[in-house]
Amino acid sequence: MKTYRIILFTLIGAITLLFLPSIVGHAIWLIGGTALSGIVAGRWDIAAVNILFFLLFLVLLKYKQRVNWRSRNIYAAFIIALFAEMYGFPLTAFFFARYLGPVSVDYTPRYALSFNFMGVDFILPSMMIFGGTLTVIGLILIIVGWAHVYKSCGALSSSGIYKFSRHPQYLGILLVALGWIIHWPTILTLIMFPIIVVTYFKLARREEAHLEEKFGEEFLKYKRNTPMFL
């Protein structure tokens, strides 16, 4: 498993470096305000890199029992649908244009953080800032939770970040999804988000039944004193 992870990290790193110039240029275009005037389409290179990056965090999800591939597949489908529509084919925009007709839209955000950096004017809409913050927090929870479980070597994880949440990594997954929905809501992701929530809640319940059987009163005491997610 360790060799597998090293190969995966190396592969994703190489792909990221390959597309780095395009990514940087696109990022400047996106948060520089120019992107606010239209819809992105056909940028499958940016879509692929983002999909690979966010799917990478599935590797860090160290389940406390046998891997549940259904939950991973649902999250993967959410990420693929999100970035395929964000940068590849704007399905939601075409859907509304097809059934509602042309709509006059003012892309200029009412609330935004504007600043100049190295001669470039940046505009960050409030929803982008809020959604991005939730996404970053979610990624941090996944990484920190993985590191703690990895160091526990099979013992019950009840310290560190696990003192505040029994499932910080699953909470991280939900925050990543919620952050992107706030920043970029689409028909598919809005439909899939409740499914993700229910799936990971059920997964958490099944894992807790396994942990109760394995650790007995030690886990029950921990469960009474620590919330499931928040």
Image (cartoon, helix red, strand yellow):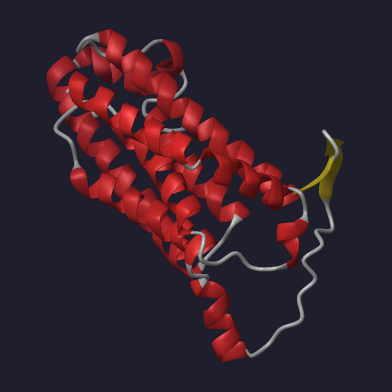
What residue appears at the point 32 percent right and 33 percent down from the top-left corner? 11
Q: Quadrant of residue 150?
A: top left
What residue appears at the point 55 percent right and 67 percent down from the top-left corner? 41
Q: Quadrant of residue 28?
A: top right
Q: Quadrant of residue 116?
A: top right
Q: Position of residue 61 (x, y in %)?
A: 31, 30
Side of 26 where 216 appears, left or right: left
**Nearer to the camera, 39 or 144:** 39
Asked if residue 71 is positioned above or below residue 156 in the image, the reply reads below
Report if residue 15 is visible in the image.
yes
Report if residue 228 is visible in the image.
no
What residue appears at the point 21 percent right and 19 percent down from the top-left corner? 2
Asked if residue 77 is positioned above or below residue 106 in the image, the reply reads above
Q: How many dots with numbers?
A: 0
**Nearer to the camera, 73 or 222:** 73
Q: Position of residue 50 (x, y in %)?
A: 46, 46
Q: Position of residue 130 (x, y in %)?
A: 67, 43
Asked if residue 224 is positioned above or below residue 105 in the image, the reply reads above
